[in-house]
Structure formats: C-alpha cells, structure tokens
C-alpha cells in the first residue's frame, strides 16, 4: 500500500516557521514528508534538515519523497522524545525550527494491517506507531483491568459510556480473547444505546482513539519532551505544533504559557526572586485552524490546531 498523507495546515506552518535558508530544521513527526518537503525547498546549500519518525513505512516514503534534497537531509528512526539525544549524536545541539504534526497519517488509518481503523472487521488489533514495540492494542485490551480500561476510555476518548464499554470488553474476553478490530467494534456498539448510535460519528471512534493514545503514550511523550525541544531552539527559532485532540492542545498551550511566564513567586511579591526567566513567547494567542476550503478538501483536518512558540 502506498504511503499517502495530506499535510494539514501546510502553508500556515511554513509561514509561521519563518525559515532561514541557512538554518537547521527538524521535523519530529516526519510522516510522508509533506511538511519536510516544503521546509527543504526553502533551504539553501548551507541549510540542514533532520527528519524523525518511529514508523518504518513513513521513513521509506519520506526518504523517497525527499531524495532531491539528499545532500542536506538526515533521517532518523525514533520518537521525537529522543530528539535531543539523536541530534547530539550527530553533533547538533541547537536548531532554528521544529515541526510536530501529532496526527495519525492517512496511511496508518487506511491500512487495515496496522489495526488503527474501526471500519474493517477482520484487521488485527494492533495500533502500534512503532512496530518494534512488542505491546500492541491486542495485549492492552486483553490484559488491562476494567478500571484501567474505563480510565483510558473516559480520559483519552472522553466517552460518556466508558464504564459500560470497559465492562463489555472484560466480560467478552473472559469467554474469548479479543483479536480483531471488528470484534472490539462490535463490543463497543453493544455497550452504547441504539438511540445514541444513530446520531453523531462512528460509535467506536472515541474508544479506538483512546486506546491508541494510551498504547503509544502520546500525551506522556509530549509532556516529557516539549520543554526540552523549546530549549533546543536558537534565539528567534520557532516550534510549530499541530494537534488533533483537545488534551494534546491543552498540553501545548499550558507548556507554552509556562515557558513564557515561568516565574513561581507569589503574586503579591513586588519583584521576582525565583530567578526563572522566560524562554520566549507564544506567537499564536489562539490556535490557527484550517480554512473551510482545506476542510472540504481534507475532512480529516477539521480538528487540527496549530500553535507556535518563538525562543527569545
């Protein structure tokens, strides 16, 4: 299956990145190389681009797509939380810009063998972003306690039927191991009242999203690595982050705010004594969202939000 993915908020990201032709830029979620291609187009012979992704299929697709820029790019397989160590290994300690597109690629969603989709009945229950990881969605669904499943579906999927869905999963696996996306989808449908299933999106969407987020530690990785990435930026350098989930967007917003206003002194102190200085400023007070035209061309872009931070 060909790796296809429409880059969301592409023009806006490139505009806000303010690319310096001779700068060093990193895409921590390389994917098919859509954002990367546009970044590389703006770089001179002195510029350098590093692409990072944990998905082998994405690495192969991006390597081919960016082949015309081979003399200025380096592609690394890994998670963006390893960015500082990965760049230090190639003697890069500061960069001029970073891009993160936290969405799941269209390729991953549409390839049944990856197990991300609830629209195919006999696909393996997988959902691993990095297939070197042994623990898959199948193991998560069949081994986590009912309370753990409830917490994941409620917090990451924000599904009001989380308790009943977790109960149905645990009851079903006591009879037979849950192995496919279709089996899980049927259980979710059975746990949601018919009148509710008639309205809104697919009833399994929220639970599948929640399991994927938990399995790949998506929110933890973002929390643990974002401040370090900001510190990697040169003065004037920018980090552009595209989120697709309210919890991701909240994390980015809060860390940008903390990086801009790090002072921990009580509000009634006349002067700051903690000594913590701002790392920079949030360029986007409100997130940039896709235009109606983009949403029409690519419905999956509807929930995307772009936030930008500039290093001082």
Image (cartoon, rainbow, N blue to C red):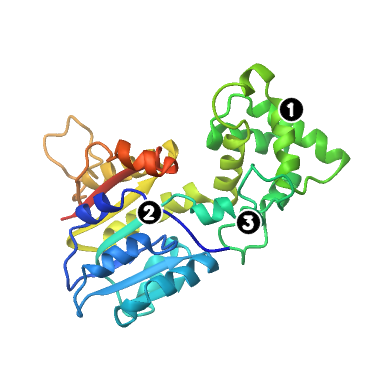
Q: Residue furthest left?
A: 270
Q: Quadrant of the N terminus?
A: bottom right
Q: Give coordinates of residue 44: x percent, y percent.
A: 19, 75
Q: Tell me the number on the disc at residue 7.
A: 2
Label 1 element class: helix
Which is more N-terminal, label 2 or label 3?
2
Residue 209: image quadrant is top right
Which is more N-terminal, label 2 or label 1?
2
Q: Quadrant of the C terminus?
A: bottom left
Q: Is residue 11 visible?
A: yes
The local crowd at label 3, few if under 14, some if 14 to 19, many if 20 or more residues have their Cα within 10 Å, is some
Looking at the image, which residue is at 31% across and 77% down?
A: 69
As drawn, 285 above or below 128: above
Q: Is residue 216 visible?
A: no
Residue 151 placement, left or right of 77: right
Residue hosting label 1: 190
Could you say which is closer to the camera, residue 297 or residue 71? 297
Q: How many marks?
A: 3
Residue hosting label 3: 114
Residue 144 placement, left or right of 248: right
Asked if marks 3 and 2 touch (Cβ < 8 Å), the reply is: no
Q: Give coordinates of residue 311: x percent, y percent.
A: 19, 56
Could you say which is closer to the camera, residue 61 or residue 288? 61
The local crowd at label 1, few if under 14, some if 14 to 19, many if 20 or more residues have their Cα within 10 Å, is some
Q: CA distance from mark 1 to mark 2?
A: 35 Å
Q: Give coordinates of residue 140: x percent, y percent.
A: 69, 48
Looking at the image, which residue is at 35% across and 44% down?
A: 252
Q: Give coordinates of residue 217: x percent, y percent.
A: 54, 51
- Please state which of the two labelled residues, at mark 1 or mark 2, is closer to the viewer: 2
């Amino acid at each position: 299956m060909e790796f296809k993915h429409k880059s969301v908020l592409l023009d806006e990201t490139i505009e806000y990145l303010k690319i310096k032709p001779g700068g060093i830029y990193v895409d921590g979620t390389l994917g098919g190389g859509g954002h990367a291609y546009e970044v590389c187009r703006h770089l001179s012979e002195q510029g350098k681009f590093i692409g990072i992704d944990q998905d082998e299929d994405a690495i192969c697709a991006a390597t081919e797509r960016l082949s015309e820029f081979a003399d200025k790019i380096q592609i690394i397989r890994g998670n963006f939380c390893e960015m500082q160590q990965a760049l230090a290994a190639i003697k890069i300690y500061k960069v001029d810009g970073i891009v993160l597109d936290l969405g799941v690629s269209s390729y991953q969603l549409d390839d049944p063998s990856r197990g991300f989709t609830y629209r195919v009945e006999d696909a393996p229950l997988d959902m691993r972003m990095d297939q070197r990881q042994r623990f898959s969605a199948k193991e998560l669904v069949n081994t986590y306690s009912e309370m753990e499943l409830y917490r994941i579906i409620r917090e990451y999927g924000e599904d009001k039927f989380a308790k009943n869905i977790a109960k149905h999963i645990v009851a079903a696996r006591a009879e037979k191991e849950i192995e496919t996306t279709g089996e899980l989808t049927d259980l979710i449908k059975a746990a949601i009242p018919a009148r509710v299933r008639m309205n809104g999106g697919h009833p399994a969407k929220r639970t599948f999203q929640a399991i994927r987020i938990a399995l790949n530690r998506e929110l933890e990785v973002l929390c643990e690595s974002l401040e370090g990435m900001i510190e990697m930026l040169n003065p004037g350098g920018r980090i552009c982050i595209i989120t697709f989930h309210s919890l991701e967007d909240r994390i980015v917003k809060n860390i940008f705010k903390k990086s801009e206003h790090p002072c921990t002194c009580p509000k009634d102190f006349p002067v700051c004594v903690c000594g913590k200085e701002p790392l920079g400023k949030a360029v986007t007070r409100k997130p940039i969202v896709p235009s109606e035209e983009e949403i029409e061309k690519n419905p999956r872009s509807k929930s995307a939000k772009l936030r930008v931070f500039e290093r001082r």
